[in-house]
Image (spheres, rainbow, N blue to C red):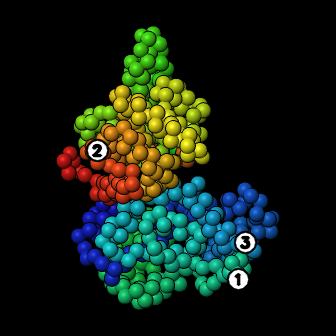
Amino acid sequence: MITPEDVVASIHSGPGGPRIGAFFDLDGTVVAGYTASAFWNDRLRSRDIGVGEFTRTMVAALDGNLLGGNPTKIGDVSVGGLRGRGEDELVELGERLFVQKTAGTIRPQARDLVRAHLKMGHTVAFASAATRFQIEPIAADLGVTHVLCTELETEDGILTGRLAGKMLWGEPKARAVRQFARDKGIDLAASHAYANGDEDVAFLASAGLPYAINPHRGLLDAAALQKWPVLRLREPRKAGLRSVLGTVGALAGLNVGLGVGAALGILNRDRKFGINTGIPLACDSALALAGVKLNVIGEHNLWRARPSIFIGNHQSSLDSIVMGSLLRKDFTAVGKKEAQYDPRTLIGGLLLDPAFIDRSNPEKAIAELDKLGERIRSGTSIVIFPEGARAPTPALARFKKGAFHIAIQAGVPMVPIVLRNTGELMWRRSKLVHPGTVEVCVLDPIPTDDWKVEDLDRITAEVRQKFVDTLEKWPDREGD
C-alpha cells in the first residue's frame, strides 16, 4: 500500500517546474472536516442565523445528505444568509477562524505533500467548493498562491447573497481545473490531484496522477475501478482518556518538581541549587507522565557554549517544558508581561525569576533587556521564543529582534533549537497534551562577536532562515 512518504519521495524524484500542476481539494483532504462548519457555528453563536435560515439549512442538509437531493443546496442557503455582509468583514472572520479553529485541522501529511510540490517548483492550487474566505488563510499558511473556489457576488464590497458563477462542486470543479491548466500552460497529464469526496471523480480524472485521500465510499470504489492510489493521511490528534490523564499527570509532575526545587533551595539556602534541581525534575516528570519523548539531534550543542542565548520556534505550551528538559540548569527565560501572573506558570516564574517584557512600553522593555545582560555575564543562559507568540501552525512567523539585541549586549553565542512537531502534540489553543515524540534539532552555536545593531535586520533574517531550512530538510541522523 502506498504511503504519503512514498508520494513525497516520488514528487522529489519526478520532474519539476511550473508546467507540473498539483491540485488540492480542501475539506476532508487538506483539512479534517469542513471549514464551513466553523463559519456557520460562529454565526450561530453570534445569533446571526435566524430561525428561518436555521430551518432551511437543516432541511437542505437532510435532503442532500440522506434523501438523495441536491447536495449543493445547503451552500445556496448559507450564501443567501450572508447577504448584506461586507467583504472585508468576511475576510477578517476567515482569518480569525483560521487561528481559532481551522489551523488545528490541517493534516500534517497534507502539509508535507504541499511542501514537496512547492519545493519542486510545481504550480500548486486549491480547487474547492469552499469560498475564498475559508480557503485563503489556509493557502497563505501553506504557501499556495492559486485558489479555484466558489466565488460570491458582491456590489460595492457588499455580498448580495448570490453566487458569482457556479459552485465548484463535481464537474464544475473539474472544468475550472482544466481551464486553469490551459491558461497557465500546465501539462495535466503529468500533474497531480488530491481529493476525498464522491463528487471529486471528474476532478481527479482530469489529472494524470490522481490520489484518493481518506476517500468516501463512492470515491473508494471509483479509485479501485480506475486503479488510482489511495492515501490514508493521519488525522489531527483528538482528545482521549490517555491525553486527559496524561495532561493531569503532567501538571501535577510539573508543579511537584518545581515545588521540590523551591523547597530544596530554601532548606539549603542556595536558590541556584533549588532551581537547577527543580527545573529538570519538573520538566522530565511532566513529559514522562504525558507520554512525551524527545528525539534530539545535535544534543552536544546544548553544552558547547554556555552561557548562550537559546532561541526556539514556538507552536505550543509544550515548548517551554521541552526547553526546560533540554537546557536543565543555569538558565532563565524571557516572556510577555501578560504571563507574569498566569497561575499555570506562577511557581516556575517564582523559581526561575524570568524577565517579563512589556511590549506596549518600549522604554521599559529595553530596560528589562539591559538587566538580562548582567545575569548572562554572571553565567545564566537565556531562552527566548523570537516569534513572540505561539504560531497556530508550523509555519514560522516573523522573528522579533529582542533576543538578537541581548546577544549583542552580552557578547555570547546564540544557539537555535528547532522544534518540529510540538504543535501536533499540543495545538496552540489546546489544553491537552497528546502522547508522542517531539523531534528536536539543536543547531551549532552562532558566534555574535561581529554582530552590529545596524545589521540586525539581515542577521535576524539569516537566523530565521536556518529554522526554515532545517524544518524543510530535517536531518536523518547526527551529522547530516
Q: Relative to 27, does residue 152 appear above or below in the rendering?
A: below
User: What percent of the width, then of the height, locates residue 94?
Assistant: 60, 64
Labelled disc at residue 449: 2
Q: Relative to 344, does residue 423 appear above or below in the rendering?
A: below
**Given the image, on which type of amino acid does mark 2 rest?**
Asp
**Given the image, on which type of amino acid does mark 1 rest?**
Glu
6 sits to left or right of 480: right
Q: Quadrant of residue 68?
A: bottom right
Q: If you read the primary sequence from the N terminus, does the residue marked by circle 3 or circle 1 appear first?
A: 3
Q: Quadrant of residue 150?
A: bottom right
Labelled disc at residue 412: none
Q: Relative to 328, does residue 315 appear above or below in the rendering?
A: below
**Given the image, on which type of amino acid does mark 3 rest?**
Arg
Residue depicted at 24% across the width and 36% down the height: 304
Q: If you read the primary sequence from the N terminus, does the residue marked by circle 3 or circle 2 appear first?
A: 3
Q: Which residue is under mark 3?
A: 85
**Residue at the left extreme of this rendering:** 479
429 sits to left or right of 457: right
CA gap, disc 3 and disc 1: 11 Å
**Mark 3: which secondary structure?**
loop
Residue depicted at 43% across the width and 18% down the height: 271
474 sits to left or right of 460: left
Q: Is residue 293 visible?
A: no
CB atoms at circles 3 and 1 under 8 Å apart?
A: no
CA gap, disc 1 and disc 2: 58 Å
**Mark 1: which secondary structure?**
strand
Q: If you read the primary sequence from the N terminus, does the residue marked by circle 1 or circle 2 appear first?
A: 1
User: What percent of the width, then of the height, locates residue 116?
Assistant: 33, 66
CB atoms at circles 1 and 2 under 8 Å apart?
A: no
Residue depicted at 49% across the width and 28% down the height: 353
Q: Which residue is under mark 1?
A: 155
CA gap, disc 3 and disc 2: 55 Å
